[in-house]
Image: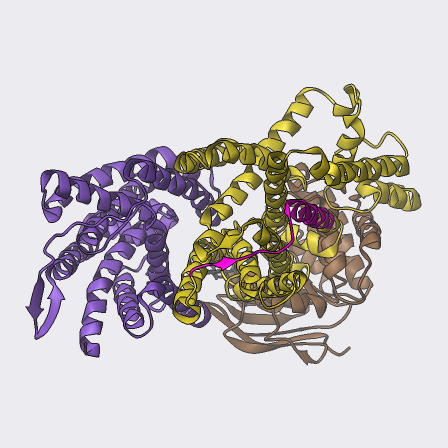
Amino acid sequence: MAALLEAEGLSKAFGGLVAVNGVSLSVSPGEVLGLIGPNGSGKTTLLNLIAGTTRPDAGAIRMDGEDVTRLPNHLRVRRRINRTFQLVRMPANLSAIETVMAGVLYGAGERVPFKEAGYVAAGLLGELNLLLKADRRLDQLTYIEQKRVELARALATRPSVLLLDEWLSGLGASELDGGMSVVWSLAARGIAVVLVEHVMTAVRALCGRVMVMNAGAKIAEGPPEEVLRNAEVIRAYLGDEDA
Amino acid sequence: MPVIEVIFGGVILGGLYALVAMGFNLQYGVARIVNLAYGEFLMTAAFAAFWMFTLFGVNPILGMFLSVPAAFGANWLIYRVLMTPLARRARTRDQLEGETILATFGLLFVLRGAATIAFTANDRYYDYLGEPLRLLGFTFAANRVLAFATAGVIATAVWVVLQFTRFGVALRALAIDPVGAQLVGVDVRRLSALAFACGGALAAAAGTLVSTFLSFNPAIGIEFTMKALVVVIMGGIGNMLGSLAAGLMLGVAEALCSYYVDSGLTLAVAYALFLIVLVVRPRGLFGTA
Amino acid sequence: MVGEDKPFPTRAALAIGSLVTLVVLLAALPWLLSDYGLSFMVSVMSYLVLTVAWALFSGPTRLVSLATSAFFGVGMYTVAMLIKLMPLYATFAVALGVGALLAGVVGVLTLRIAGMFFVIFGFGLSEMIRQLMVWWEINKTHTMGRYVFVPFDATLIYEHLLGLAVIVFFVGWQLRRARLGLALMVIGEDETVARQVGVNVPFAKVAIFVVSAMFMTMTGALMAPRYGFINPNFAFNPLVSFQVVIMAFLGGLQRLWGPALGVIPLIILSELLQTEFPFWFSVLLGIVFMVIVYFLPRGVTGLIEDGWKALGRPLELQRGLTGPLVDAWGWMSRPIILPRGIAGAIEDVWVKIAPQTKGRR
Ligand SMILES: Nc1ncnc2c1ncn2[C@@H]1O[C@H](COP(=O)(O)OP(=O)(O)O)[C@@H](O)[C@H]1O
Ligand SMILES: [Mg+2]
């Protein structure tokens, strides 16, 4: 299938530190691309570059054939690229449903009338088993619920590329199953998912393709079994115990 | 009057602005307090100099040995009593800025109102070294030259302290990276209080100098606060040499404007410079320290 | 918020009914009050509009605007300058345009970058415009003030201000159930999230800033005929900005009507002190404000709400005449939402999808 999102030679330096160094990436609709690598290897920064949270120093990003490299964050959202944050970001004084409604109202595609946005948002929360928590605020939700609300907020903008930054980390064994099935269902409805993850069971089960980063550079790419056997990858991980 | 003389006049004024801005920069760049009442301290010091001079004939430059330490103490107290609770409850730097803006905005009206009650709203002026002085073939009022020289001495002293003492290094570290500074053992609270107090002391010095050659009233504070803000933003937050350069620029720009257009438009000049910086280089002409 | 124990339409009707009655009563005041009473109400009404308009922008975005007096002054002085050239209403229209333009320019220049710049810029804006106007009047037009003599008396001013107040409340109320209002709430909480839901953050901020400034400008314009003689020093008075901020903080920003609660006590204070002891007034204002910043971050509204909580559910108290008014307040200031509230939406969707959800669990 033709790639939906293509990034080419993305680079970003913070002062002297090169966080992302000439990384290319592509994902197709319905595909789950795994992105792994030790902490500090530049995964989050790469997602920031794609989502438009940060501007790249070099490289290009194409979405559905259109060059979006220079588009600001909110316009990339309207071009159907969205993401979750590694550390949950949710407006502290708004309820879950209000946050999701904002996404429904400002997201890609046709404008949803304000009166219907609440229903759409409630529907999305319902899909993620959060309906009864719809009027809760950030501090009234558990960590896992917060992560789900954030996913609902991202889905509300009707993305076709979704960047999940360690969305499955911190889940217990039983919750992990539920979380994995959510990711799987996203891909099943045709969303191209980039999954940054340390939980290898999830990566093995969900990803058709895995990309490994180390020190800002891509060091391997391919099917999960193959890549995870790769000597360089093992070395990269063993070099960093907390990975 | 030749343009060169106008520019010299601007440099003299600019030296004073640089001093005003350095004090503000210590408070904002290091202690992270946006002090909207900054100009009120300057105004208070100007009145102190005025009364000491007219009542007791105290030489304003010597009077600074009294008013500057007093201002230091007062500002240290203000930081301890009024700013510490805000610093403690603010979770982010933006929040701290927002809260201190509000608190010092209230303080501004308290101080200004109190000064007006105490000293009336009238313009004040005293005659100190008003005679002309010939310098490099140009004529200047002696009090302006003295003010410039004093400002220069103080600014140099501040710079030397910041550059070459342990205290100065700690202050600069705090300006650049508060978290990092804390990690290497800098006592942030104590140092912030000292930086804030030093800023207030510089405001008092500047106020004294202002009183020697300009007329003033209890309402002048806002204008000096505004100019300090503009100069600090132009020069870069936390960047003392930037403040110096930007202060001189503002002084010269103002002098040129008063000469060619009107002397009543000084704030407009500051605003024009502010706008240029906002549009062209929001991080300051010389970057952040 | 008020409980949902009765069917909604009746409550809405009651709320609207009591609000309409309130407005009608207020509109009748000029014929019921003495001259002094009327002039007091003109002050109240003008500051009511200014404060609620201020809160439209500064409430959700949490950017403290210190530029109120700049817009107020622009409105007032535009009318003063043009009154000899065109009919009164035409001067109002021009003033409104000038205010909107100024707000647009200031917003575009300062709202794109860190909030600090905006606050600082607003802080000196009024003072700078005052300087420019003084210079202009002395050097170009050779006047040091303008006479505004038009048949537009206190009663007319008051009624116009009341109309403006109704509009600003309506706009605020609509905003709480509109896309832009929700976007502003998200912006105030976390701009990164706002961008990530697709909000054009600078645009949203500038838009609401312009709207808010237009109300302020219009208030200034309406107040111009109140004073026979206007000069720049009078029109651009920094105390206006300060009073508005205090009133809003005193009232509290969580509710639409919150800021309004702060207006009356301060106007009374100002009436008592401002003419005879203007500088004590300034000192007192400063102290009041600092007390609010330090001890009452949620304003009087917060106190009242806490009081209600302490007293148990407010609706269990004797409702009396104020009952419908309380409902109206509650209804007007309900945090953003659909006509029937979040609860309504949730109930509906719940009914539709509950079986499946249960099944999957
Ligand atoms: N805003 C920033 N400023 C400075 N350095 C940053 C910033 N964001 C990330 N970095 C640095 O870039 C590197 C890559 O970080 P990150 O992308 O978060 O890695 P990962 O998500 O793979 O753990 C790290 O060394 C981190 O410290
Ligand atoms: Mg990361």
Query: The C terminus of chain C appears in which quarter of the rendering?
Result: top right
Q: Which of A26 and B10 is in front in this view?
A: B10
Q: Which of B95 and C143 is in front in this view?
A: C143
Span highlighted in magenta in the image: C144-170
Q: Which of C265 and A28 is in front in this view?
A: C265
User: Which of the 4 image quarters holds residue C303?
Assistant: top right
Q: x and y percent of residue B158 in the render?
A: 19, 54
* Up/down of A62 relative to B40, above or below: below
x 30%, y 75%: residue? B260
Please tell me the colour of chain B: purple
Residue B190 placement (x, y as % from top left): 29, 39
Q: Position of residue C49 (x, y in %)?
A: 63, 47
Q: In which quarter of the image is residue A65?
A: bottom right
Report the residue at 22% width, 55% height from top: B214
Q: The brown chain is which one?
A: A
Chain rendered yellow: C
Predominant SS of the magenta segment: helix
Q: As rendered, which of B245 and C235 lies closer to the eye?
A: C235
Quarter-of-image position of residue A175: top right
Ligand 2 resides in the quarter of the picture at bottom right
Query: Percent position (x, y) of residue B130?
Result: 11, 58
Confirm whether residue C297 shows in the render. no
Q: Which quarter of the rendered picture does the N terminus of chain C lie within?
A: top right
Q: Is residue A152 above or below residue C333?
A: below
Left or right for B132, reference B241: left
Relative side of B17 to C225, left or right: left
